[in-house]
Amino acid sequence: MFDSLKKELSRRALLHKAGFGLMGLSVAGVVGQIIKPVRTFAQAAPAPSKEPSLPPEKKLGWAVVGLGKFATEQIMPSFAECKRSKLVALVSGDRAKAEKYAQQYGINPKNIYNYQNYDSIRNNPEVDVIYIILPNGMHAEYSIRGAQAGKHIMCEKPMANTVEECQAMINAANKANRKLMIAYRAQYEPYNLATIQLAQSGKLGKLKSITSDHGRTLNPKDPADIWRMQKKLAGGGSLYDIGIYSLQAARYITGEEPVAISAMMYSTPGDSRFREVEENVNFVLRFPSGVLANCTSSYGYSNTKRIQVFGSDAVLELDPATDYYKHRLVIKDKNGNQEQKIEEKNQFALEMDHLCESIMQNKQPKTPGEEGLQDVRLMQLIYEAARTGKTIKV
Ligand code: NAD
C-alpha cells in the first residue's frame, strides 16, 4: 500500500545493518561532540563543526506559516544560529502581529502573506522553503498548497491527522519535485544522537529494553492548548502531541521498526479537557531484535521528557531527553554512574540547516515525509490496540 514508505524503511534498515545507525546518521560526528567525558564510551577525538556560515545571499529563504507559541518563541529566534537558512517571509491570519515580527526580524512587509493569498507565494523567488507550524489538522492542506506553489516543505510533528493525509503530502512533494521534511528535532539534537550512537554501537551491551515517558499538563486557558483539545485540529490527544516523542525514541534508538504493539488508554472521567482527545496512553512495542519498549504519554502529569535504555552491560538515562536545552545523560554500569557532558547545540537551527543541505545537495532529508507517515500509522495502531485490548502485529 505505502510503496514509498516501504522503500524508505528498507533503506534505513540497510543503513542500520551497515552500522551507520538510524536513517543514515553520521555517528562519527556525534561521538566527536562528546566533551569532557568522565569515562569515555565513545572514543573518537572531539571534532567540532568547522563549517562556516554561508553569506546571506547564499542562504535559502524561509517562510514561517503560523505565528504561534512555538514559531515565535523557538523557531524564529533560531534563524540567528543557522548557517544555511534565513527568515524572509511570514504567513499569518493576523496582519498586525505579522508586521510586528516582520519589523523585529527585518522582513520586507511585501513578504507578509495571509491564509487566503498564501498560494501567491509561488511568485516570490526569495522564498525557497515553507515551514508549517500550524495546528496538526492544518498541516496537510498547507504543506500540499506550499509544494504546489513550488516550495520545499518543513512540517511540524505530527505530520498530519491521518495516514491518507500524510500520503497526499508525500505525493504532492514528489509531484512538484520538492523536498518534504518532518521537524523531528530530537533526531538532530546532540544528546539524542549520542544516545543512538551509544545504544547502537554495543557500548551498553545487548539492548534489552527502552522506556520513554513524555507528559505535561494540558492547560485549557492557554490558547496554544485550546486547539489541542479538539480532535479535528489536533488529530489525537497526548499521544499525537508528546507521546510521539516516546514512539520516536524507541524507533531511533533501536534503529528498528516495531513488529507488535499493545496499549492501554485512560482519560479522567468528567474532565472537560478530554471530551474529544485522550489523556493517557501507555504502549509497549516489540522490535525484531527482541527489544521491548515501554512508552507512556500523558496530558495529566507534570513536565516529563525521559528516556532510559537498558543494555546487558549498562543502563543509559537521558533526562531531560527531548527538551529544548539542558539535557542530562548518565550511564550506569558496574563501575557506578558517569555523566556524559556534550556540547549543547541549537537543534532547531541544526534541523533547518539539514533541510537546506538536503536541498542544496539534492539528497533525501534524514526525516522525510515517510518518517512522519510511519509514526501516524503506528499511532493509529496504538489506538487500535488500546481500543481492542489486543496485541497488534504490525
Ligand atoms: P499555537 O496555537 O501557539 O500556534 C498555532 C498557530 O496557528 C497560531 O498562530 C494560530 O493563530 C494559528 N492558527 C491558524 N488557524 C488556526 C485555527 N483554525 N485554530 C487555531 N490556531 C490557528 O500552537 P503551537 O504550540 O505553536 O503548535 C503549532 C505546531 O507546532 C503544532 O503542530 C505542534 O505540534 C508543533 N509544535 C512542535 C514543537 C516541537 O518541539 N517540535 C513544540 C511545540 C509545538
Image (spheres, rainbow, N blue to C red):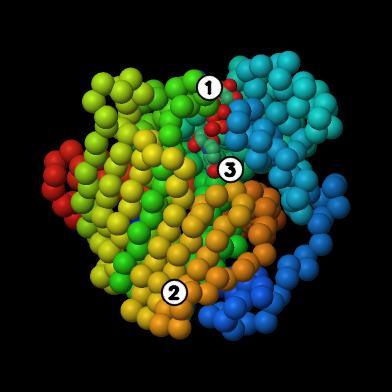
Disc sitting over residue 15 in the figure = none
- Is 151 situated above or below 335? above
Q: Nearer the viewer, mark 1 or mark 3?
A: 1
Q: Amino acid at mark 3?
A: Met
Query: Where is mark 1, residue-wise?
Result: 223
Q: For this view, does 240 lie left or right of residue 181?
A: left
Residue sitting at x 32%, y 44%: 379
* Near-viewer residue (275 or 17): 275
**Callout 1: CB less than 8 Å from ligand 1:** yes
Query: Where is mark 2, residue-wise?
Result: 332
Query: Where is mark 3, residue-wise?
Result: 154
**Picture coordinates of residue 334, whole percent (x, y):** 41, 82
Mark 1 or mark 3, which has the lower sequence index?
3
**Picture coordinates of residue 200, whole percent (x, y):** 44, 74
Residue 355 appears in the picture as rendered: no
Quadrant containing the C terminus is bottom left
Callout 1: 10 Å neighbours few (<14), some, many (20+)? few
